[in-house]
Amino acid sequence: MADILTLSHVDAGYGPTTVLSDVSLTVGEGEIVALLGANAAGKTTTMKTIFGIVRARKGQITFQGKSIERAPTSVIVHSGLALVPEARRIFSRMSVYENLQMGAYSRPTGSDLEGDLTRVYELFPRLKERTSQVAGTLSGGEQQMLAMGRALMARPKMICMDEPSMGLSPLLVQTVFDTIQEIRKQGVTVFVVEQNAFMALNIADRGYVLQQGRIVLADAAKNLLTNDLVRRAYLGG
């Protein structure tokens, strides 16, 4: 299996503060890979660095074999990477339909938007029921569905999800992770940043553990579920 995303010895941070130190990880095409860590471990900074929102100070990031660590965010998105950001970040004053249209802004004019809308609505029937509703009036779970649907409208090769379970009820968390598995079945690679280690590792192929900006563990997800450090720090065991 070829790697679709690679971070090699990446440092990044804000101003004089270094947040990520010597971070190396890979995501293989067709995989679900989880990045786990506590608050302030550097998970969101990792995501921002992949998308060029925070610039890597050192190291290399490649997507589909091409270096992207110096590329503008717009170029990275056009290359086939889509982001489901932390806290959803939907366009709250727009309708559900308009939000989904915004997800396709990077695609060529005249591409099959209606066909992709149909696929998103099949994955998220609740969005179809609320297609004309103002997005800011949706529940937290519905907003998460919308953020995921919006990302899929870009027809990405890979989706990066930042804390998709944040603020959701246990039932909705299960729904979100079931949907992530379905997205992978449709041929989209998934990189998920999560605090909910149990849920993430139960659907992932592999996982990494980030502590204080450094990767301290990397293994198959099933092995991380039984690892003593992971059990003590993230699984309450």
Image (tube, helix red, strand yellow):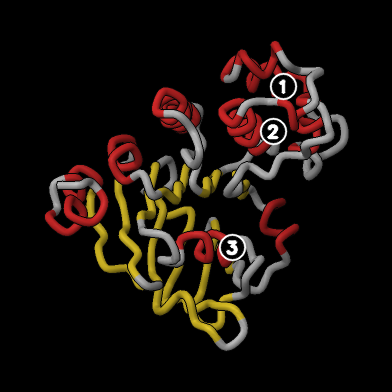
> In the image, what residue occupies the spot 52% across and 60% down?
44
User: What kind of residue is marked 3?
Assistant: Lys
Identify the amino acid type marked 1: Leu
Query: Observer-nearest residue: 126 or 29?
Result: 126
Compared with 30, 37 (above or below) is: below
Question: Can residue 126 be seen here?
Answer: yes
C-alpha gap between disc 1 and disc 2: 7 Å
Q: Which residue is mark 1?
A: 117
Residue 213 placed where, x, y %? 40, 72
Instruction: Tell me, yes or no, whether the two marked residues, 1 and 2, touch with CB atoms within 8 Å.
Output: yes
Instruction: Count neighbours of disc 1 (C-alpha within 10 A) and say few if under 14, some if 14 to 19, many if 20 or more.
Output: many
As drawn, 46 above or below 155: below
Comparing 22 with 137, the one in front is 137
Give how far apart the Cα atoms at labels 3 and 1 are: 27 Å
In percent of the image, x 77 and y 36: which residue is there?
Answer: 92
**Disc number placed over residue 153 in the picture, else none:** 2
Judging from the image, what secondary structure is the residue with disc 2 in? loop
Residue at the limit of the structure toward the right, as seen here = 109
Q: Measure the alpha-carbon separation of dots 2 and 3.
A: 21 Å
Of mark 3 and mark 1, the one earlier in the sequence is 3
| Relative image position of residue 24 (x, y in whole percent) | 38, 69
Give the quarter of the image for residue 232: bottom left
Q: Residue at x 51, y 74 (%)?
A: 60
- Closest to the camera, between mark 3 and mark 1, is 3
Which comes sooner in the sequence, label 2 or label 3? 3
Q: Residue 55's spot in the image, x, y percent? A: 62, 74
Image quadrant assignment for residue 119: top right
Q: Which residue is mark 3?
A: 48
Q: Amino acid at mark 2?
A: Met
Residue 20 - label = none
Residue 88 appears left or right of 95: left
